[in-house]
Image (cartoon, rainbow, N blue to C red):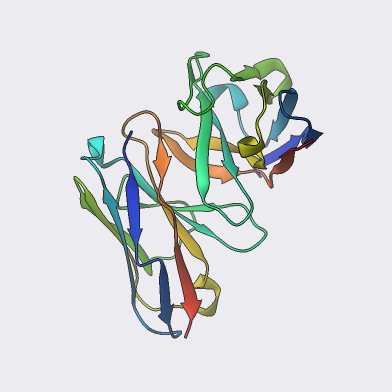
Amino acid sequence: EVQLVESGGGLVQPGGSLRLSCAASGFTFSSYDMHWVRQATGKGLEWVSAIGTAGDTHYPGSVKGRFTISRENARNSLYLQMDSLRAGDTAVYYCARGRRGSSWALDDWGQGTLVTVSS
Amino acid sequence: EIVLTQSPGTLSLSPGERATLSCRASQSVSGSYLAWYQQKPGQAPRLLIYAASSRATGIPDRFSGSGSGTDFTLTISRLEPEDFAVYYCQQYGSSPSTFGQGTRLEIK
């Protein structure tokens, strides 16, 4: 059974930093593209970043230069380093697995971790 | 970036009825790389459809997707009580990947 478990969320001040982690199990982690998606309370989904099996990374303009996605295949772990945080970054952050062969369709999701940016 | 507009915003139907949800893109979606997700309150999204018309693993065949270019549709042939939720489309044909704003499917 595929499991994705996020951790590291919490309350941080504007301008601060936070590092999210996602522990993966139940599949060959190194063989899949991985993603972060966020959702502000009562709002829709926003794709935040992706990392390919070769370590290539992708970001939307809203987080580029502030967020860094990385992976550690030996630990079956995905990370999101978030710097220069803003109030608009407040959301639940989901870790998600890209589907093999259609790798930016997200076929398994964690339950999310809440990040609150506030003074 | 490609903007996805979903309609209607809210759809009120009864169990057993047919639901048709629309997702329109601001420009053509490359490769018909469009997915549909279902999200229930307090839960993570669940992948229903990928590549516009392929059902994900374990998804009942009452869910079907169609379309290409800029116009895509999710159809639920006969609504079951568990189908009432919020539905999102996502394009992943070009970066950045983007989601629609969602359609809320509620019980009439």
Residue A65 visible? The answer is yes
- Whole-percent x, y for residue B105 in the image: 46, 71
Q: Quadrant of residue B43?
A: bottom right
* Viewport quadrant of the C terminus of chain A: top right
Judge left or right: residue B61 versus residue A82.
Answer: left
Residue A32 visible? The answer is no
User: Which residue is at 41% across, 85% downward?
Assistant: B16
- Residue B91's place in the image compared with A24, above or below, is below
- Residue A114's place in the image compared with A59, above or below, is below
For the residue pair A39 and A5, the one nearer the viewer reads as A39
User: Which residue is at 44% across, 58% downward?
Assistant: B102
For the residue pair B34 and A85, the one nearer the viewer reads as A85
User: Which residue is at 38% across, 70% downward?
Assistant: B62
* Viewport quadrant of the N terminus of chain A: top right
Judge left or right: residue B6 versus residue B106.
Answer: left
Judge left or right: residue B78 versus residue A4.
Answer: left
Q: Quadrant of residue A77?
A: top right
User: Which residue is at 40% across, 30% downward?
Assistant: B96
Judge left or right: residue B61 versus residue A42.
Answer: left
- Whole-percent x, y for residue B83 in the image: 50, 71
- Whole-percent x, y for residue B47 in the image: 48, 51
Report how many numbered discs are placed on residues in the image: 0
For the residue pair A110 and A12, the one nearer the viewer reads as A12
